[in-house]
Structure formats: structure tokens, C-alpha cells
Amino acid sequence: MSQLTATIIAAHGRHYLADADGLRLQCVTRGKKTNVAVGDVVKVTLTSADQGVIDTITERKTLLYRSDQYKSKLLAANLSQLFIVVATEPGFADDLVSRSLVAAEAAGITARLILNKTDVTESLARTRERLQPYASLGYPVHEVSAKGRPEETVAMLAPLLAGQSSILIGQSGMGKSSLINLLVPDADIAVREISAALDTGKHTTTFTRLYQLPELGAGSSIIDSPGFQEFGLYHLSEGMLERAFVDFEPYLGQCKFYNCRHLIEPQCAILSAVQEGKISKMRHTLYGQLLHESAQTLY
């Protein structure tokens, strides 16, 4: 039986769709394993002309996932950058944005924000103000209007996507689909084909899917993920957490106690920075919350 190397372009339950140089393969894993993510490069043994079994996953450069108390959910593998899509309306959740940034840092992935619907001018100033804390941490904010100024939007995003493996994440209603349809003109057709191949019913958008962007150069791809409201990070250990907050970095290693948790300890460099306004209270509160969550893990 022949073995092919393929990239996972969609996943739903234990069913996967892989692309091997243009050949679409419906795949399953051996046994009950479900540790395959969209973006994974896999070795597949063909069982028919368009079906196969995933034998191995090649070594991943990066892996992005979210987790709750009980289980973790793989979002995508081999990403180089993450775009968090927010909009002027409906309002976005700071908690989701903050957690996504921490997840990206922990996974070694570059993070950027896209502010969509800038044509809704009455909410624009307030939204910009809300994004300022992230911009001041060094995360770029790119302003676009997918529906109001589509050509400008593509012109701004295309150079950022060139040669990168990117994922778009965000809550429902932020305009992710509009952005994907601009960047991948035949995305709707692709979704229908993938739905049929994965047998997920006609109108599902509950699966993550990868689109190649060959016109932007080799290795360019974009992953669209379902809108989600929560981003659990129960899998991050204490050490991973403190390093995933970029604003903590200048102060790490300066606390009195080497095993300082930066919560209530005396002579803690992080707490001093919070008091002096060098680290925002919102960020430190989130850190404390994530630390608490990581102690609750049951898996």
C-alpha cells in the first residue's frame, strides 16, 4: 500500500480531510486517537483512491490549543501567526482577546489584532481606546472594513499573510467569514465540498479548516476557526504562564523568592510593577485567574 505525505485541511470529530498535492483524501486515525489537528503534516496509507488512514504526525513546529478542566481541544498545528478579529460592533470580550494573546505567546506564535467594521464610525473611537492596552504591549492592530472597503482590506492583509501559516480567531459576529471570503474567493464552495466530504451536514461552520493561499507565495495558508466565546488555558503551567505575559518579562527573576508566584509574596518585582502602573491591573488579574485555573486540572 502506498503512503503519502498530506496536510490536514479540515477536521470534524474523528474524520479528517487531507490534501496531498491537490489530491483530497478522507482520513481516519488508527484506533480511537483524536490527536490530529488542522495544519498537521501527516503520513497517510491509502485504503482506496480517495481514502486513507493516518499513520503518523510529523513533528510540529507549533501547536495551539485551548483546554478546560477536563479536556483539551487542539485548534491548529504548525502556525506562525494568529490574528484575533474584533469589531466596532458587536462589542468584543477583553477576556477572550487577552487569553488568545497568552495562548499565542505560550505556543511561540506571533499575534496580531484585526479591528474590523471601521466604517461603523460611532463606535470607532471607543473601540480604539479599548485596544490601546494591547497595542502598548507591542501587538499590532490592523484596521479594516471587510464590507465597506474590501480592496483596501485585501491590500493591507495580503502582505501580512504572505509566506505565513495564519489562523483567524474571534467571537461570532466579528466578521471573520467576510474576511475569509475576501481572502479566499471560493471559500463558500470549499466549505460545501468539505462538509460533503466530512459528512457534517450542509450548513455547518463548526469545523476548523485550512485554505492554501498560493497566490501569496509558497507556504501561505489561512485557517478559519469556529467562533468561540471562551478560551480556557488550563494546560499552561506556572512557569509557562509567567513567560506568556510579555509585560512581565523585564521583571522575571527579580523577585526576592525564586519560586515567587507573583500573587501576594513580599518583595515581588511583578507586584511592584503593577503598583507603579508599569503592568496593568487587568493583566495581573487575568494572570491570577489563569494560575488558579491551571491548579484545577483533572486530566
Image (cartoon, rainbow, N blue to C red):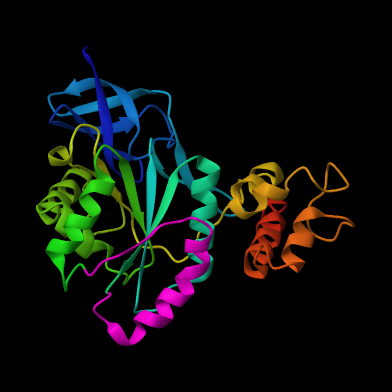
Residue 185: x %, y % from top left = 10, 54
Total residue callouts: 0
33 lies left or right of 87: right
Q: Residue at x 55, y 56 (%)?
A: 232
Tell me the quarter of the picture where residue 76 sits.
Answer: top left
Q: Quadrant of the N terminus?
A: top left
Q: Is residue 284 placed above or below 105 in the rendered structure?
A: below
Q: Is residue 137 magenta?
A: yes
Q: Residue furthest bottom?
A: 122
Q: Which residues are magenta?
A: 118-145
Q: Quadrant of the C terminus?
A: top right
**132 or 38: nearer the eye?**
132
Q: Is residue 67 placed above or below 116 in the rendered structure?
A: above
Q: Residue at x 13, y 47 (%)?
A: 193
Q: Is residue 299 visible?
A: no
Q: Is residue 89 magenta?
A: no
Q: Residue furthest top?
A: 1
Residue 285: x %, y % from top left = 68, 66
Q: Residue at x 15, y 26 (%)?
A: 21
**13 or 165: nearer the eye?**
165
Residue 133: x %, y % from top left = 53, 67
